[in-house]
Every structure is written in structure tokens, then in C-alpha cells.
Image (spheres, rainbow, N blue to C red):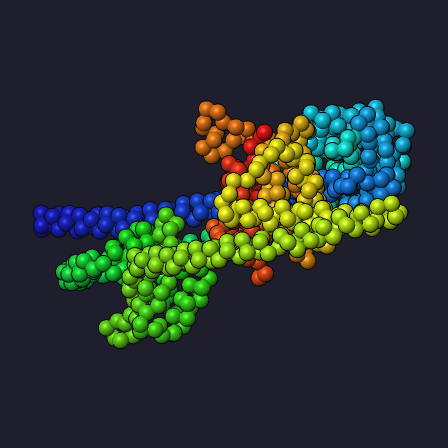
């Protein structure tokens, strides 16, 4: 009896141990899964906190960098406004009125001074927003801060700043100030005194100091001035520093942000990850059961997919499928080759496709929204423009149709694309040939009209000059000097008109013109009276800059004067905008190196560069591509021949006519002439 019970008990005990081992293994796996999920949650919470801190710091660094850029731009504009007070060699009283007006507009300035070459004061104005804090005897030529800034400005040939220094006020108060020294062309300096605190208030964005502290510090961290909100208890400090590198002075812009830590973001993320983790475990259990069924279904679908793919890969028409949300669900190799993007790049693009041109993206979004809303595309298709991965554009013909499933329910849209670049290229060649023929005919007509007008206008101009000479003879000795001067001007302009007409006639007939050595100042003096009339009408200030010791240039004086006059008029018309306040036309002559093939020749000539700069709205890329094309113009009353003729005249002299963007705005036209 006992011999039979022992094996049964042993088997029972073995089964019990086996059940316990299986139960322990199952619970061990669940415990391990729980530990892993808990570790994941802790890691996510920690990473979320680190992410929030890094986001706050990155935002603070970006705002500080933007504030430094705004500060530099504001200082540059102030320097330009300060320089403008010397336009036209003003008198001391006129300059004082301009300085007072500037001080009312710029609270950051405490004082503006005009000093001669020896730093002796010529005139000074104080801000109306503070009591005068400077003693005139102490603002002499021996003041160290001003002398230091002006010495640096003289070495740099431009503006310079002095290191910040402290100015004491009454009742133990004081201000941290900085001097700006700006050399002027007529000799001497303009000195402006900045209040560092007001500089922060006026030129740094107000939102930067909202909820945080903004300060100027020395390079070693010494705080000079600060504005904003002091630190609150229980907050973290986020600090960002940016270097404000000014000529002659170095400052640090420091921003201290206060932030309570952490926000609700990590808590929401933790709950979200926990829910997703539980759902993931449940989905894994369900997927394990469904795997067998899917494997059987995949075997049947593999053959069908292989057959369909072979057919789609063999066509040369691009195919694209989108779902009802606008996401790309399928593209064939022909489409990928057409746009230059891989299948993965197109699938990850989302709602905005990477092959949409930037300038047409809004139009394509509207068209896609209309399709997704149920709009029916035209059956004959429509044309559009796509962009390859390398940025090149090409035209396509698109056919679209609803994409329906086995239940006849629409699941998206299927599109077919045909590249019509070659067709458009042939059409463009044909159109360009027609345009060249038309342009040649119009140029021939213009040449004939120019020859006819030059012949017909010569006699009336000669008669005007004769009448003017006769009038001068009659007025000689009569005491009517003003009338005689006016008649003399009429004679001069009639002679100038005759020269222009003869130059145009010779230019059209391709005759060699007589060139002479002319001083740059003479060329500018000839056109400035005519430019000044239009400048006064449009409210444009003219600024002429000539480098010292410029030699003469070899040129056809009449044609080059017309080039300068045409460029100056174009520049002033570009600034004829009601919203534009600063209208300055800058004419400059300086030395330039030889350009083009002349630079590579062993006997390369030297050149002078003439530049005409405006502060208008600039030239767009589309206009720049056709700027020198004959008969192309952006004005309703223009003929489109001015710039084309100007470039032809400059190139006949061996030079080149170029243009580039002006800073901070506008355009600069430059052309070169050979030195005598």
C-alpha cells in the first residue's frame, strides 16, 4: 500500500512544482514587462523635463540674438539720421534745429554735438526729456571718452563708439552713457551721447523685457544697466548672453528669464505614454492571434501585387494616389524619376508635397482642398508646374479621377502626370524666334525714327541758338543781366540738345565718336542741374561722393552724361513712393579694377567706377532677368530702351554696366570707364 502511494505522491508533488514553475515564469514575464514600462515612464518624464528646459533656453537664446540684431540695426539707422544733419553743408543754426528734432525723436540720445577737426565744440543740443546733465566747460576738446572715440573713428574711416562710462547726477544718482563719434566729409565730427538704459528701453523689443530682466554688461560680467522684472521666489533662472560688438566698444546683452518648473506638459505626456503602453500590450496579444490569418492572406496577395507592380513599373506616365486627407499613398517609379524624390521622401511629405514650387504652394493647397471637398476635375486634364529635387521647374499635364474600393466607396484620388517639358521647349523656341523677329523690326523702326528726328530737329535747334545769340547781342550793355543770363542758358541747352541729337544719330549709324579725356567732376556737374530739378519735385536729397585725386576718363562726354542722367532719373522714380520717408540719391565715383577679359590681359587698363544708388523697393528676381531686354519696362509710360541703350554705350567704351541690391534697401547701378 505504501509502495503505491509514494510514486503517486511524487507525481502529485512534481505536477505541483511544474505548475508553480509555469506560474512563476508567467508572472515573472509580466513583472519584467511592468518594470520596463515603469522605467520607460520615468525616462519619458525625465526627458520631457529636459526637453522643456532646452526649449525655454533655445527660445531665450533666439530672442536674445534677435534683440542684438534689432539693436545693431537701430544704431545703424541712428548713425544715418545723424549723418543726414550734415547734408548740404548746413549753417550752425540750421544744424541746431535738425539736432533738436532728432533728440525729440530719439529718447536714447542725451546730447548731440558738432565738433571741428580739433574736437572743439561748434554747436550742441541736449535732449528735451531730461535736465541738462553736462557742464559745457567739461565737454571740451580734451575729454578723454570723446577723444578716444573720435581717434578710433579717424583710424577706421567710419563711426566709432567709446567705452561706457558713468556720469554722476544730483542726489547721488547717475547714468551709464556711451559716446558715438561720426566723422563728416566737410571735416570735423558729430558726437552723440547715448544713455545705455534708454538704449535698452527704445531699441530692444519690449516683449523681451516682459517677464524677464534685460541688462548691458561688460565682457567680464560687470552689470552696467538693467531693465525688466526682477527674479521671483521659487523660479528657475535661464540666462542668455550675446556679444554686441561695436566699433571701438564691446558690450554684452544679457537676458535673465524666470520660469516656474515644470509645466503641465510632462504630466500629460506621462499619462499619454502610460495609456499607449497598456494599449500596446493589448494590441500585441491580439496581433499574435491575427498573425496566422494575415500570413495566409499575404500569400494570396503576393502574386496579385507582383503582377500589378510589373504593370505599373513598365509605364512612362507618372502615377500618384492620395487618400481623402490628402496624404500620398502610392507613387510609381516613373513619377519618382520625374520629380527626383524617392518613394520614402514622398510618403513622408504629408499634406504639402515637396515637388510643389514655393511660389505656387498656396494655389496648389486651394486646388487640393477643392478636390478633397468633392470637386470634380476636368476630364480633359489641366496643366501645372512641378519642381524637381534640384529646384528646377517643369510643366506637367495632370489627369485626376476618384479612387474607389471594392465597395464603390471613394477612398481618395488617382492622378496621372505627363511631362510636357519638351513640348513647351519647342513652343518656347518658336515664340522666342517670333519675338526676336518682332524686336528686330521694332529696333529697325526706332533707328529710322531716330535718324529722321535727328535730321528734322537740327534746323529748329540751330534757329533757337541763332535767336538766342541775337538776343544776347541786343541785350549786351542794356543792364538786363538776369535776362541775358536766362538767354545764355537757353543757348547752352539748345547747343546741348544738338549734341545729344548728333550723338544719337552717330550711335544709330554706328559711326565712330570722338572721345576725349574728361574729369569725373565735369560729367557730374553737367547732369546735376537737370537731376536737381526732378529731385526737388520728388523730394529727393542728392549726395555726391568723389574720392580724392581721381584721374580723367576717356569717353564720349555727351553719351556718358546721358547714361548718368538716365540712371539718376530711374533711381529717383524708384523712390517715388508715398510710404518712403528717406529719399536719398547717392552718386559716387571711385577707382575700380579692370573687369571682364581686360583684367586677364597683360596690358590691363585701369578703370573708374561710377555708381548710382537709391533707397527704393529694389528689383525682384523676375524683373532682374529681363532688366536690360529692349522694350521691357515696368512703367506704364516707359519705352523699355533706356537701360538697354545705357549698357550698349558703356560696353562701347569697354566697360560694363551692373546692378546689385543696396543696403539696407534699394538698388545700386555701377558702370566703369577707362582712365585716360
Q: Where is residue 605 in the image (x, y as percent from the top left)?
A: 52, 28
Q: Which residue is drawn at 73% across and 48% down?
A: 491
Q: Position of residue 223 (x, y in %)?
A: 71, 33
Left or right: 165 as drawn, with respect to 507: right
Location of the C terminus (image quadrant): top right
Q: Is residue 98 above or below residue 425?
A: above
Q: Which of 280 and 125 is in front in this view?
A: 125
Q: Position of residue 82 (x, y in %)?
A: 75, 40
**Quadrant assignment, res 167:** top right
Q: Which of 156 and 560 is in front in this view?
A: 560
Q: In this view, does 390 lie above or below 589?
A: below
Q: Residue at x 68, y 58 (%)?
A: 578
**Quadrant assignment, res 297:** bottom left
Is residue 37 visible to the viewer in this orientation of the structure?
A: no
Q: Which residue is drawn at 9% across and 47% down?
A: 3
Q: Is residue 34 above or below residue 255?
A: below
Q: Residue at x 36, y 50 (%)?
A: 389
Amino acid at each position: 500500500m505504501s509502495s503505491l502511494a509514494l510514486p503517486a505522491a511524487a507525481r502529485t508533488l512534481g505536477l505541483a512544482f511544474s505548475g508553480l514553475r509555469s506560474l512563476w515564469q508567467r508572472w515573472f514575464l509580466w513583472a519584467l514587462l511592468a518594470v520596463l514600462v515603469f522605467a520607460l515612464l520615468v525616462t519619458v518624464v525625465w526627458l520631457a523635463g529636459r526637453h522643456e528646459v532646452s526649449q525655454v533656453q533655445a527660445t531665450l537664446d533666439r530672442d536674445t540674438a534677435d534683440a542684438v540684431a534689432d539693436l545693431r540695426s537701430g544704431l545703424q539707422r541712428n548713425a544715418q539720421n545723424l549723418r543726414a544733419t550734415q547734408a548740404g553743408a548746413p549753417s550752425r543754426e540750421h544744424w541746431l534745429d535738425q539736432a533738436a528734432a532728432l533728440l525729440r525723436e530719439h529718447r536714447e540720445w542725451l546730447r548731440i554735438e558738432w565738433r571741428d577737426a580739433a574736437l572743439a565744440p561748434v554747436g550742441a543740443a541736449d535732449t528735451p526729456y531730461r535736465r541738462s546733465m553736462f557742464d559745457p566747460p567739461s565737454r571740451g576738446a580734451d575729454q578723454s571718452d570723446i577723444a578716444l572715440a573720435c581717434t578710433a573713428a579717424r583710424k577706421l574711416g567710419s563711426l566709432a563708439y567709446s567705452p561706457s562710462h558713468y556720469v554722476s547726477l544730483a542726489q547721488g544718482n547717475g547714468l551709464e552713457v556711451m559716446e558715438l563719434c561720426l566723422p563728416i566729409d566737410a571735416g570735423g565730427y558729430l558726437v552723440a551721447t547715448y544713455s545705455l538704459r534708454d538704449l535698452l528701453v527704445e531699441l530692444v523689443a519690449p516683449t523681451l523685457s516682459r517677464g524677464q530682466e534685460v541688462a548691458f554688461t561688460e565682457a567680464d560680467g560687470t552689470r552696467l544697466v538693467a531693465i525688466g522684472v526682477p527674479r521671483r521666489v521659487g523660479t528657475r533662472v535661464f540666462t542668455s548672453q550675446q556679444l554686441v560688438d561695436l566699433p571701438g566698444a564691446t558690450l554684452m546683452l544679457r537676458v535673465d528669464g524666470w520660469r516656474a518648473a515644470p509645466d503641465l506638459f510632462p504630466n500629460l505626456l506621462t499619462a499619454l505614454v502610460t495609456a499607449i503602453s497598456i494599449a500596446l500590450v493589448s494590441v500585441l496579444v491580439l496581433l499574435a492571434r491575427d498573425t496566422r490569418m494575415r500570413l495566409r492572406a499575404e500569400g494570396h496577395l503576393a502574386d496579385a501585387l507582383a503582377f500589378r507592380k510589373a504593370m505599373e513599373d513598365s509605364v512612362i506616365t507618372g502615377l500618384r494616389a492620395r487618400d481623402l486627407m490628402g496624404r500620398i499613398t502610392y507613387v510609381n517609379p516613373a513619377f519618382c524619376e520625374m520629380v527626383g524624390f524617392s518613394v520614402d521622401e514622398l510618403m513622408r511629405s504629408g499634406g504639402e508635397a515637396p515637388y510643389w514650387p514655393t511660389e505656387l504652394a498656396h494655389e496648389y493647397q486651394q486646388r487640393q482642398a477643392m478636390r478633397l471637398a468633392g470637386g470634380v476635375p476636368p476630364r480633359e486634364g489641366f496643366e501645372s508646374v512641378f519642381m524637381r529635387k534640384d529646384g528646377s521647374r517643369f510643366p506637367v499635364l495632370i489627369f485626376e479621377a476618384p479612387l474607389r474600393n471594392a465597395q464603390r466607396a471613394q477612398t481618395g484620388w488617382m492622378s496621372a502626370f505627363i511631362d510636357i517639358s519638351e513640348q513647351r521647349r519647342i513652343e518656347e523656341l518658336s515664340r522666342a524666334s517670333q519675338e526676336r523677329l518682332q524686336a528686330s523690326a521694332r529696333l529697325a523702326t526706332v533707328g529710322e525714327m531716330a535718324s529722321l528726328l535727328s535730321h528734322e530737329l537740327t534746323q529748329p535747334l540751330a534757329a533757337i541758338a541763332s535767336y538766342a545769340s541775337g538776343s544776347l547781342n541786343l541785350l549786351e550793355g542794356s543792364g538786363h543781366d538776369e535776362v541775358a543770363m536766362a538767354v545764355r542758358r537757353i543757348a547752352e541747352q539748345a547747343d546741348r540738345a544738338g549734341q545729344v541729337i548728333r550723338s544719337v544719330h552717330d550711335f544709330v549709324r554706328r559711326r565712330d565718336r570722338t572721345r576725349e579725356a574728361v574729369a569725373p567732376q565735369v560729367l557730374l556737374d553737367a547732369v546735376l542741374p537737370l537731376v536737381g530739378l526732378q529731385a526737388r519735385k520728388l523730394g529727393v536729397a542728392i549726395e555726391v561722393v568723389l574720392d580724392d585725386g581721381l584721374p580723367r576718363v576717356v569717353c564720349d562726354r555727351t553719351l556718358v552724361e546721358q547714361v548718368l542722367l538716365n540712371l539718376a532719373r530711374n533711381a529717383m522714380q524708384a523712390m517715388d513712393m508715398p510710404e518712403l520717408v528717406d529719399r536719398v540719391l547717392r552718386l559716387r565715383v571711385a577707382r575700380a579694377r579692370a573687369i571682364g577679359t581686360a583684367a586677364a590681359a597683360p596690358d590691363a587698363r585701369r578703370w573708374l567706377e561710377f555708381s548710382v544708388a537709391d533707397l527704393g523697393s529694389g528689383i525682384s528676381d523676375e524683373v532682374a532677368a529681363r532688366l536690360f531686354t529692349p522694350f521691357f519696362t515696368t512703367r506704364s509710360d516707359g519705352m523699355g530702351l533706356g537701360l538697354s541703350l545705357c549698357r550698349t554705350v558703356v560696353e562701347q567704351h569697354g566697360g560694363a554696366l551692373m546692378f546689385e541690391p543696396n543696403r539696407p534697401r534699394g538698388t545700386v547701378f555701377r558702370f566703369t570707364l577707362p582712365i585716360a
